Amino acid sequence: MTVPTVLLALLSVVLTLLLWNLRWVLLIVFSAVVVSVALDVLIALVQSKSRLQRPQALVVVLGLLVISATVLGQLLVPELIEQVQQLGKDLPQLIEKVSSLLNADPRLSGFTEGWVGEWNLDRLQPIGAQLLGFAGGAANTLIQVFLVILLAVLLALDPDAHQGMVLAITPRPARQSMTRLLHDCRLALGGWLSGMTISATTVFLLTWAGLALLHAPLALLSALICGLLTFVPTIGPTAATLLPAGLALLQSPELVVSVLVFRLILQNVEAFLLTPLLLRRTVNLLPTVALTAQLSLGALLGLPGVLLALPLVVVMQVVMQTVVVQQVMDRWT
């Protein structure tokens, strides 16, 4: 083994360790890139309808987002707060109901002894008291969110300058290919974000309307969770169904069946009709690839890894297609 080979191997190990130690910084930076691409989609839309320059268009987009968030907050937040408080009251009843159903089967009675003991009703604390225990984590999360938003706004303000930094460290013969690669990644990520946002909003509205028509409890809170978890395909919609189905169990078994049938129909419409229709011109992620990425990044980085798994896969798919497939595999002789 030659000396350059040994040095290259050591350098690779050092860089790998450095990237692993900086994984949370890289996670924040990639989150900012995702948010900046979402802003860039809106900025391009505003510029197509007006003659505004990018800084002015960014101000308009941020203003519209703040106004929209304020209006939606005034309309939905009071009811959401009431439903969260009601969920805190219903949760002990739901746990007791599920444990009684499990204990009715002798084969499952041993299974319930452990977790029911942990979730004894006397040990359950109000949701507000529990949240106090997470004050430090919540403050840290707020700081990270603020950093993501700040970096995203700076990236969206002048994307050409940041792209120029990437091109400056790219070898001259590959700069044209790198420019096309960055452009393709932006289009794919922007298309995925637009499609998933429309899909999630549609799921939220339809779930809210459907649960309200079924007279299911906490319809708004359940619909909001179902809409947000649409951004986590495969795992999210199934996990989101547990809340409305569990709350319906407190009323009647017939309502549980109705809620499950309604969510099953809506999930299939979203998964096999709505989402493929919205994403047909951008990306086509295989369910196996999406699930593997979510499990892998979830194991490495926790919940942030699960949330950012699919945007990362969208970018990696473009990189693999452009670099590995077209530049290496297709030219293999």
Image: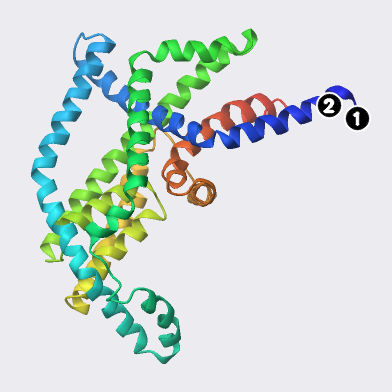
Identified by mark 2, the residue type is Thr
Mark 2 residue element: helix
Q: Which mark is residue 1?
A: 1
Point 44% across, 40% down: residue: 308
Question: Which of the 4 image quadrants contains residue 21?
Answer: top right
Relative to 109, say whether 87 is above or below.
above
Point 49% across, 32% down: residue: 25
| 285 with respect to 256 (left or right) | right
Relative to 233, say whether 248 is above or below.
below
* Residue 264 can be seen in this image: no
For the residues labelled 2 and 1, say whether their Cβ atoms are less than 8 Å apart.
yes
Point 53% across, 34% down: residue: 316
* Residue 127 can be seen in this image: yes
Measured as percent of width and height from the top left, residue 248 is found at 21, 71
Relative to 126, say whether 32 is above or below.
above
Residue that lies at the very extreme toward the right in this rendered image: 1
* Nearer-the-camera pick, 267 or 113: 113
* Nearer-the-camera pick, 217 or 82: 82
| 43 with respect to 191 (left or right) | left
For label 2, count other residues whose C-alpha is less than 10 Å away and answer few (under 14), some (14-19) or many (20+): few
Measured as percent of width and height from the top left, residue 137 is found at 37, 46
Identified by mark 1, the residue type is Met
Measured as percent of width and height from the top left, residue 221 is found at 20, 55
**Colouring rule applied to residues:** rainbow
According to the image, label 2 marks what residue? 5
Q: Which mark is residue 146?
A: none
Mark 1 residue element: loop
Report the number of discs.
Answer: 2
- Quadrant of the image for the N terminus? top right
